[in-house]
Image (cartoon, coloured by chain):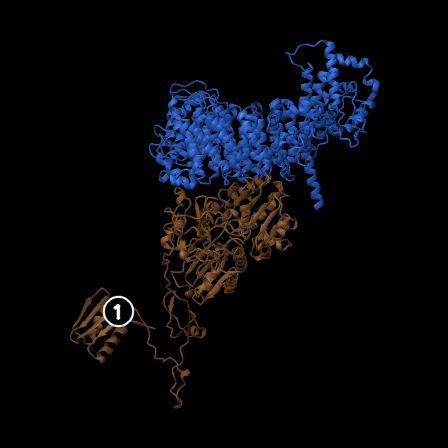
Amino acid sequence: MWREPWGGRLSSPPVPGAKARTAGLRGACGSAKKTRCIMDRECSQLLPSVCAVLADSRQLVADDTFLEKFLDWFKTLTETESSLLLLQENPCLTELITCVLKLKDPSSSTLSFILRLTGIFAASESCFQYLQQRELLISLFGEVGPLSSALWEEASVRSGWVQGVHSMVQHQSALHFLCSCGAIEVIFTLQGDPSLFVASAANQLLVHMLTFSLQSFQTKPENIKDCDWPICAQKLIVHIEESLKSNSASRIKQSLKLLTSVFGCCHDLWTEVLWSRLSEPIVYLLEEEPVHAGHSLVDLFLSMARSPVFSCPECSLWTSVTCALEHLNPAQVGRLAVGVLKLQECPQAVKIQALSVLLQPMDCVLKAASQPLEYPGLLNRSVNDSATVETLLSCRSSCASLLCQTLTHLEELQYLTCLPVDLPHIPLLQSVVTILQFCIGLATPASCLGNKISRILIGCFRVQRSALDILGALSHWESPSVFIGSVFDILLAYLKSPDTSPTVLKKSFQATLKWLVSLSEAPSSKDHWQQTEQFLQDLFLVLQKRLCSPYWEVRDSALEFLTLLVKHLREKEGFRQVLFSSEVPKLTEDLLEDPESYVRASAVTAMGQLSFLTHLISKKPGVENGNVKEKSIVAQLKEILSTDSEGFPRRAVISVFIDWLREGHPDVLKDTEQFVSSVLQAVNSDLDWEVKAGGLELAEVFSAQLLGRLGLAACPYAAVLSSATRSTHLSESLQIFCQVKLFEFLFGALCDCDRPVAQKACDILIALKAELCDESSLKEGTSAGLSTEARGIAWLEETLRRWSSCAKPCPRGDADEAGSQDPNGVLLVLRTVDLEGLHRSLNRSSDHIEKSPQSLLQDILATVGTLEENEADCY
Amino acid sequence: MLDCGLDMTSTLNFLPLPLVQSPRLSKLPGWVLKDGNTFLDKELKECSGHVFVDSVPEFCLPETELLDLSTVDVILISNYHCMMALPYITEYTGFTGTVYATEPTVQIGRLLMEELVNFIERVPKAQSASLWKNKEVQRLLPAPLKDAVEVSTWRRCYTMPEVNSALSKIQLVGYSQKIELFGAVQVTPLSSGYALGSSNWIIQSHYEKVSYVSGSSLLTTHPQAMDQASLKNSDVLILTGLTQIPTANPDGMVGEFCSNLAMTVRNGGNVLVPCYPSGVIYDLLECLYQYIDSAGLSNVPFYFISPVANSSLEFSQIFAEWLCHNKQTKVYLPEPPFPHAELIQTNKLKHYPSIHGDFSNDFKQPCVVFTGHPSLRFGDVVHFMELWGKSSLNTVIFTEPDFSYLEALAPYQPLAMKCVYCPIDTRLNFIQVSKLLKEVQPLHVVCPEQYTQPPPTQSHRTDLMIDCQPPAMSYRRAEVLTLPFKRRYEKIEIMPELADSLVPLEIKPGISLATVSAVLHTKDNKHVLQPPPKPAQPPASKKRKRVSDDAPECKPLKPLLSGSIPMDQFVQTLEKHGFSDVKVEDTAKGHIVLLQEAETLIQIEEDSTHIICDNDETLRVKLRDLVLKFLQKF
């Protein structure tokens, strides 16, 4: 693989695996750049043949994606150069349109393509006129065109028509044209098209037409009725108004969707005028019983509420939002309520009402499990008729959905940086705990509704998951001991229960972690410590059992939880004591040999964390007895790195080693160089690219640490070293890098078949080159007679080959001799190899040649040729 | 009789039967009454505040007072757990009927009985306590002895000859086999999915269908899946044998079992699993087969100790047709359907008839021991409880749901070993029952009263009861229920030659009638219409007729009448025939026509007409003919 000479160019990459790739990249680089902006000669030459193929109804282009790519190319072209010029210089394009129009029986895909292509050209006003003069636009988009042909039945043709019109509407002439040729009515019809794609595109087109026609209309007229809006806009508004007043649910929904998009994308003043005109029929929709287009109305109000045009507290929008909060079904209104609560600008009264809407189902649940007067409840007053909520809660089909939605919305609120209203978090916490109790049959119903809720919720995993999510989120509030106790109780119940599903168990672990972390960080953490310690003791008993579970998901979740728990609480002396008085550390170590690779990986990560503590705790008398293993944890992890057949555990080991190196793990600090050297050697022979990438990260951390320690890192605040000291430190660091065989590893990775590995190795080498090969060292190297010219290419090849071979594990143990690096040689290699050029090559996507327009055109022609050949064969 | 299970919870009131002399048990103090009276101290012993009978354990028999069991013709057995009282019924009550059960039920039932007899007989106990059973004395005893019911009927265990005799009365049946019972009903066993050979039964006549759903399971364990479809269209569904622990999901419990087992063994402790020799143990061994490697327990020995351990493990492998689909397909590979064969082959599982003999040589700790009896009152388990009870490293894991684990452990207190309760009951829970009832839609459900209300300890769990429409009919002990259906119809077969002779007359479009004159022949509850014998010929000779020639006397057949009599026309006809003084009175059931002059009364009702005249036969015949004119004849 090294036989091929480098052609005398040291700038070409010394990467055998990547050689073919980079050579290809160089070849295509020039043409790709050119054709991206303008039509080049090669493409111009190919275009007539391609157009001829496309215009020939017998020559079907098999792959539709060619046409899409073709359109994308023209879109780019028309954005950068004159569309008119393009048409004039390439008359084959106009001929193509004319030709397809004349075809008796064009294919639907070709016709759709032509509609879209013409739309792209017609976006330019001059080009629009050019096409108009040739009566191509009226033939394509007018009543006599595809609209009246049988092909209009094809959704792709209708879609092409809408997209063509959408592209075209970039100037007033296009709008006039559409108004005059009756196209607007067609678009109105297409809003209700059976194809959802066409209907959605038609709706978006109307949004675009409305905003485009009114984009210059910035002032607010005194009298709405007398406003002088363009004809097209007026037509559209009348259509929307009529739809809203119609009894057709689908028409109402289409108009509401249209308005949602308009208010969402356009924040001009005219939108306020539009709302004034349409608010009446919209409010009327809210007053209907039952409200039909609830979800669409919520979307509309949320879209409007986010527009600065309506942020004024006196705006009539808020009256409508209030009305919606009162009238909409509780299952629909939650999204509106949470949306309102997230707004910066919103009247306080509306926010309070929105919060009440969200709290109402929780209030009902709390009351269903409490004796009257036992709890005051969550709400001072009820916004909606609580009977509606109760009905939904007592029905199997709606109860779980309503509760899940409500819990999710309330959880979202917990993560808001600033909650604009007072959240009754204690009653909310109680209600969440009550729901969780209902779900495992621990709650005692206090009413008929409670009985129904109990029957529905027992064993309902969906609600359990949502409730555990919010329970975790509620941990950031300061809570009195009694409530912390009830939280701990319910969490333990879920963690202990054999019926807890693996996904619910995972959520339980997450919620537990959040509570423990919050409590440990709270100012009052000492007050709760006794309670927490008792909980931890119970928790570790459960964890022991979960670590022995026959289900790997459970063992895995338990290990992940343990890892995070140790990570967050390892500074707590009490935590460490409870942890090491349990069997958990021993069981975790046992799981390093679990048959399931995911579990082994998690056990590795957990042991990585635990080993920080083991070090602390093993100094204490009495702890050694139980947990001392014959083999150290470093040795165990290294063995996994070298021998485990699955990638996950090996990746986990390398991540742990990186953490250890970063955080200064005592076992690593004992002999960092030896540690890094052995790890790099193991990683070098690994076939998993992620392990290799991890090894590179380790190398990066190691080199940064070493350079930093010797004062060589590029830190603006570091003391400037004298040149002599710097030179000494440089050579010292270089010596160490050579000892750990860092460069062998890095150059090996540079030749890796996986691009991310090669890229990362290249990055690190460039950084090291910047540090190590400064001018002085270069001079030094040159003066020492180490120039490339002096040693020659053969030497460079030979050096790299030697490094490559000795970076692999050597069975005979003579690797040291074979691979011992000469620091000066390393410097010379670093200086010689064009790392920057290689970096550029590696950053290019491997398929960039195939993306060129020339390639596309050739592909189209080639495909047709293949088809012809096949036909001939068949004949 | 549907099933005959044995209530073994009575044995919990007795002291365990140790295999070797137990100093601890023999030193237990006798129980003394509050007033210091010691007359019961030989019979009753006290252990950690509980009082136990120091005698051979006794069992509570099925109800025998309510009906005379000698009148029972047939006993249908659902599964091997539900036949443990069979020897008491067949050998002591004058029972002469037939018992129906599937082959695995009989074979494994025999193993269970054999084990039970062996456990009791190999530890003979000289003492037999009976004083405490005296009602006056029992009143003075502490609970639960005080509250034990029908103690006078409790009996010692049966013997092997009795078992053999009882089993000889069993007729083997296969799933979906139709068995005629005296022509009256047909019974059919269906797979119930609970245990090897376990069955639900359909009892049906031509027009009625009663389903008896006993221990059934919808879970995918080793037995053949439950046959639900055949239970459809039942008039009555008798539902029993639901899970005893509705809050314990078997999957979760198996997970608990494995986790606790692994934790104990990893800490150097032993695990004791009191169990029956068949049933859930097969599933547990299969589960452990998959788990032991992942839990690093490959080197831990598993021991299965029972007098019938070998037979049980081997029987399970040969009942291929009674196994679930997956296991059946293995047989054709051919592979043993249960993986415990491999465990035995690789020496991971070893089985012994008892702790004596080979076991003592092979015994290595830490280990896992499966042994009986789950009540902890007899069997090898007693030895292990005594042996391992003192160390907190060891664990006893209860998997059988039949006994309260706290009561089972009471005579072993104080106990240092850990106790884990993982009841694995695969029988139907209430959610599954609800789905099953929706699926099979019986007209009525009949079930024990306990299933119609939440468990007393969890009165808020309204989900733990049967919820169906119409509400289930419940019954309690010794209650007599009338099943909510009446037998209205019988099916009668008609002989082909008789059918040929019929001439149907269409009286309405689509409805034809024909009169049938035949002899109804009834035998073994089957009814057949046979052609009537030909009219008796005048005797050709004056020879005396032989008795066997006696045929039923065949009178000339009268036509059948139908239709109604229009009163106005009838009166006109009467007048036309000279009856001048005709009066008609309406009655609740019809009309009365009075012929005052003739002193005659014609009573016309929906289904009868009476002519009441004073011995004037001519008049009666005349009037009869007038009435007949208005009716159609067949």
Percent position of residue A47, x then y: 67, 30
Number of dots carrying numbers: 1
Residue closest to the eye, A290 or A638: A638
Q: Is residue A1 visible?
A: yes
Question: What is the chain identity of the residue bearing mark 1?
Answer: B
Q: Residue furthest top?
A: A722
Secondary-structure class at tag 1:
loop
Q: Is residue A689 visible?
A: no
Other residues around mark 1 within 10 Å, as few (<14) / some (14–19) / many (≥20): some
| x 40%, y 55%: residue | B133
Percent position of residue B86, x then y: 47, 60
> Residue A803, located in which quarter of the rendered image?
top right
Chain A color in figure: blue
Amino acid bearing label 1: Ile
* A249 versus B284 height, above or below: above
**In this rendering, would B544 be left or right of A20?**
left
Look at the image and tell me in which quarter the N terminus of chain B lies.
Answer: bottom left
**In this rendering, would B113 be left or right of B134?**
right
Look at the image and tell me in which quarter the C terminus of chain B lies.
Answer: bottom left
Percent position of residue A195, x then y: 51, 38
Percent position of residue B467, x then y: 40, 48
* B582 versus B212 height, above or below: below
Residue position marked by numbered label 1 in the rendering:
B565
Chain B color in figure: brown
* A757 versus B568 height, above or below: above
**In this rendering, would A521 be left or right of A366?**
right
Residue closest to the eye, B302 or A218: B302
